């Protein structure tokens, strides 16, 4: 009679790789936000700038 045993392996993620996986999207989102912010704030067209300005007033955030 022969018996077989199953060997299972588990992988654990390290804290460093988890932090890096969370940090990349946060940095990308912050960079995109800054690009959009400066793109609207210094827009040549007054329509984009005024729209952002009005949103700041509607959400009761100081702008001047």
Image (cartoon, rainbow, N blue to C red):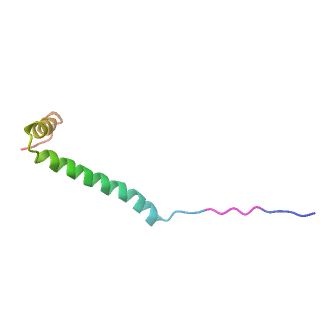
In this rendering, the answer to whether 37 lies above or below 9 is above
| Residue 60 screen position, x and y as percent | 15, 37
Q: Residue at x 24, y 49 (%)?
A: 33
Quarter of the image for residue 54 reads: top left
Q: In front: 47, or 61?
A: 47
In this rendering, the answer to whether 63 lies above or below 26 is above
In the rendered structure, the answer to whether residue 27 lies left or right of residue 61 reads right
In the rendered structure, the answer to whether residue 24 lies left or right of residue 2 reads left
In the rendered structure, the answer to whether residue 30 lies left or right of residue 40 reads right
Identity of the residue furthest to the top in this view: 58
Q: Residue at x 10, y 48 (%)?
A: 42
Quarter of the image for residue 45 reads: top left
Identity of the residue furthest to the left in this view: 64
Q: In front: 64, or 31?
A: 31
| Residue 29 screen position, x and y as percent | 30, 51
The quarter of the image holding the N terminus is bottom right
Give the magenta part as a residue range.
Answer: 6-10
In the rendered structure, the answer to whether residue 22 lies left or right of residue 59 reads right
Q: Main secondary structure of the magenta part?
A: loop
* Number of marks drawn: 0
Q: In front: 2, or 44?
A: 44
| Residue 18 screen position, x and y as percent | 45, 60
Q: Residue at x 83, y 62 (%)?
A: 4
Q: In front: 59, or 8?
A: 8
**Residue 23 among magenta residues:** no
The quarter of the image holding the C terminus is top left
Identity of the residue furthest to the right in this view: 1
| Residue 44 screen position, x and y as percent | 8, 44
């Amino acid at each position: 009679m022969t018996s077989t045993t199953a060997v299972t392996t588990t992988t654990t993620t390290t804290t460093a790789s988890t932090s890096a996986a969370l940090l990349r999207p946060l940095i990308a989102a912050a960079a995109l936000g800054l690009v959009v912010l400066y793109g609207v704030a210094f827009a040549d067209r007054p329509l984009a700038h005024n729209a952002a300005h009005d949103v700041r007033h509607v959400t009761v955030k100081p702008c001047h």
